[in-house]
Structures are given as C-alpha cells and as structure tokens.
Image (cartoon, rainbow, N blue to C red):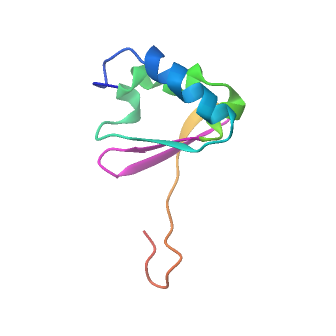
Amino acid sequence: MTSRTAPVEDAVVAMKPLLQQGTKLVIVSGTTYDKIAGGKFHTYFTEEEQKNLFFGLGRGAYNYQITDDRPEIFRIYDSRPGKDC
C-alpha cells in the first residue's frame, strides 16, 4: 500500500491467493495496527487465511499474529543462548 490511509482492497486481492495456499505473509510498517484499515485489516481475511498473516509494526516494537479473529502481540525468541529478543 502506498500509505496507511490508502484503500486496502487491491492489497487484499493480491494477498488472498497466497494466504490460501499457506504462504506466510508479513506486513512490515513503521505505523501501529490501529492505523492500518482502522485496525480491521484482518477482517478482510478468513480465519484460515489469518493463520498465515503476520505483522511487524511500530518500527519493530510490535509483532502481531491473528488469534480468534483479533490481533495479538507475540514475542519473537532467538534460540541462541543469551539472545532472547
């Protein structure tokens, strides 16, 4: 998308086939989830598609997955000793 306020429909159309075939997609942006499609971007996708949709937002401060049809922050772990992110 060209900006966080741009219509999301074209992106959704391009993403759906990939999500349906099990491709993991990550949206990376400096903004926060509530500013992408009014915080409702995940509602454009089915529950099965949402399982493959992830977000890295807020300049890396927030990582989201969709759980029970809502965005949920999760933590990324580094398996190297002493390297917990």
Is 35 positioned to the left or the right of 81 in the image? left
Residue in view at x 47 percent, y 15 percent: 9
Look at the image and say whether residue 59 sits in the magenta stretch: yes
Residue at the image position 41 percent from the left and 20 percent from the top: 38
Residue at coordinates 39% horizontally, 26% vertically from top-left? 36
Which image quarter is the N terminus in? top left
Q: How many marks?
A: 0
In magenta, the rendered stretch is 53-68
Residue 50 vs residue 10: left or right?
A: right
Q: Position of residue 43 (x, y in %)?
A: 58, 22
Q: Residue 22, located in which quarter of the rendered image?
A: top right
Quadrant in the rendering for residue 39: top left
> Residue at horizontal 49%, vertical 85%?
81
Q: Is residue 59 above or below residue 29?
A: below
Q: Position of residue 17 (x, y in %)?
A: 62, 28
Is residue 27 found inside the magenta-colored segment of the image? Answer: no
Residue 20 percent location from the top left of the image:
68, 32
- Seen from this angle, which residue lies furthest right? 48
* 44 in relation to 23, above or below: above
Comparing 18 with 4, the one in front is: 18
Q: Quadrant of the C terminus?
A: bottom left
Q: Check the image and name the residue furthest to the bottom.
A: 81
Residue 85 vertical position relative to residue 63 in the rendered view, above or below = below
Residue 21 placement: quadrant: top right
Q: Give the x, y percent position of residue 5.
A: 30, 19
| Magenta portion: prevailing SS class | strand
